[in-house]
Image: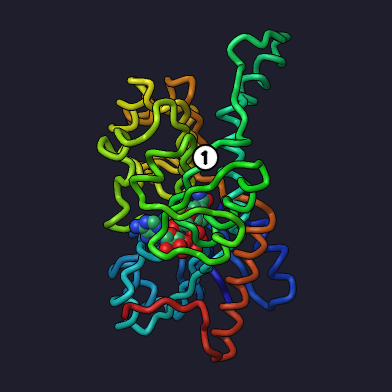
């Protein structure tokens, strides 16, 4: 079985090479994303493995079908980038990795939070220049603060467990309340009350039509002055223009984000020699109280191992003609 990997980085290549040792597969790694120009690289492979920003439309699917590809293994949870009905018509099966280390993302959210409020990134730079002054480095305790958690699924739950360890009070909002979270002392409240009462807010719900721009001028107006906002979920949960206004008016005290509304044009690439055209991220980067990471919350050895093993197991199950538990279908 020959598998063509698109949009690969060194960590994908290392992880898949390591975990494929027990399988008799030939792996071809391509740096480029899968698109209309690069799809011909799939010729000669029976399986394609793509990532979150590889759009798989009908044109690409027809080409893949022509090359004899029968399985597309998405090494991510989301599948909105795939034309599932076109795949179904062509008989191409689609599998994904539904969950990989929620703790990886929750711990990164905590890393963003602590870095923002204790300014360790600034201390690191200062000390390297022999500047041992503490001026401007005053932070605040997480202990005793009210943290609003929006979405208590796998990642939100992991975040709540860690935050409880800090001695914070957790106020949560989800469409479905978790008994497990209530048992550890999480209090569910209506969304507006979570916004009003929390000093720190961390977003862990998916991007849906209902949650797009969940953080907007109206919801920001409910929040406390100086609120700390953390987003490791999806960029479009935040109306970036409204957040920039709230940063300018000092309504937001700290903003820590791992995701950004227009990230597909920027993230996962080294643009250090380029002129950035994106005015909003450039503006965000001018604020001393904004911390941005480039969608790296998932990036731990444990999560990469889970992504590789789940993907390879799906390919093996497909090869043996078994039921595909991680298959996604149009209907
Ligand atoms: P999950 O499906 O386990 O949990 C999502 C929770 O959000 C569920 O409890 C659901 O009821 C709740 N929810 C849905 N709509 C809601 C709404 N309108 N308001 C409040 N809550 C709502 O998903 P999981 O694994 O916890 O992931 C959460 C999000 O984290 C994903 O959707 C994804 O966007 C993001 N993510 C980010 C990664 C990164 O590297 N930065 C990596 C993996 C996921």
Between 108 and 57, the residue placed more toward the observer is 108
Q: How crowded is mark 1: few (under 14 residues within 10 Å), some or many (20 or more)?
A: some
Q: Position of residue 294 (x, y in %)?
A: 50, 40
Q: Is residue 99 above or below residue 13?
A: below
Question: In the visual, does 292 lie left or right of 12?
Answer: left
Ligand 1's image quarter is bottom left
**Colour basis:** rainbow
Horizontal and vertical percent position of residue 122: 61, 20
Vertical placement of residue 206 versus 165, above or below: below
Residue identified by numbered label 1: 146
Which quadrant holds residue 283? top left
Q: How far from the left and from the top, in percent, is residue 142?
A: 60, 35
**Seen from this angle, which residue lies furthest bottom?**
321
Q: Nearer the viewer, residue 8 or 63?
A: 8
Mark 1 C-beta closer than 8 Å to ligand 1: no
Is residue 328 visible in the rendered structure shown here? yes
Image quadrant occupied by the C terminus:
bottom left
Q: In the displayed structure, does residue 161 sit left or right of residue 88?
A: right
Query: Is residue 53 or residue 60 the one in the foreground?
Result: 53
- Residue in view at x 65 percent, y 63 percent: 16
Which quarter of the image is occupied by the N terminus? Answer: bottom right
- In this rendering, position of residue 327 left or right of residue 86: right
What element does badge 1 sit on? strand
Taking the spot 55% from the left edge, 29% from the top edge, the residue there is: 116
Q: Which of 113 and 304 is in front in this view?
A: 113
At 37% from the left and 25% from the top, the residue drawn is 251
Q: Which residue is drawn at 57% across and 74% down?
A: 2
Residue 240 position, x and y percent, is 32, 35
| Left or right: 209, with 162 as reference point | left
Q: Can residue 33 be seen in this view?
A: no
């Amino acid at each position: 079985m020959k598998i063509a990997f698109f949009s690969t980085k060194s960590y994908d290549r290392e992880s898949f090479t390591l975990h494929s040792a027990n399988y008799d597969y030939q792996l071809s790694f391509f740096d480029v994303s899968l698109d209309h120009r690069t799809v011909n690289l799939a010729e000669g492979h029976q399986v394609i493995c793509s990532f979150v920003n590889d759009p798989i439309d009908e044109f690409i699917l027809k080409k893949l079908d022509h090359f004899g590809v029968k399985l597309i293994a998405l090494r991510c949870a989301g599948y909105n980038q795939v034309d599932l009905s076109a795949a179904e018509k062509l008989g191409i099966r689609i599998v994904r990795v539904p969950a990989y280390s929620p703790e990886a993302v929750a711990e990164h959210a905590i890393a963003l939070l602590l870095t923002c409020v204790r300014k360790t990134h600034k201390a690191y730079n200062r000390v390297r220049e022999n500047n041992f002054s503490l001026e401007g480095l005053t932070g605040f305790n997480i202990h005793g603060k009210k943290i609003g958690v929006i979405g208590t699924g796998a990642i939100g739950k992991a975040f709540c467990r860690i935050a409880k360890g800090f001695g914070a009070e957790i106020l949560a909002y989800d469409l479905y309340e978790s008994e497990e979270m209530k048992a550890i002392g999480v209090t569910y409240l209506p969304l507006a009350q979570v916004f009003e009462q929390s000093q720190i807010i961390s977003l862990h719900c998916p991007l849906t039509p209902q949650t797009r721009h969940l953080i907007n001028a109206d919801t920001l107006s409910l929040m406390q002055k100086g609120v700390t906002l953390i987003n490791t979920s999806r960029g479009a949960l935040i109306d970036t223009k409204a957040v920039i206004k709230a940063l300018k008016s000092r309504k937001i005290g700290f903003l820590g984000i791992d995701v950004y509304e227009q990230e597909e044009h920027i993230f996962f690439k080294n643009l250090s020699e380029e002129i950035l055209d994106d005015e909003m991220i450039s503006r965000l980067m001018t604020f001393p109280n904004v911390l941005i990471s480039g969608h790296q919350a998932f990036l731990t050895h444990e999560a990469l191992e889970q992504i590789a093993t789940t993907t390879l197991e799906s390919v093996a199950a497909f090869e043996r003609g078994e039921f595909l538990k991680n298959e996604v279908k149009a209907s």
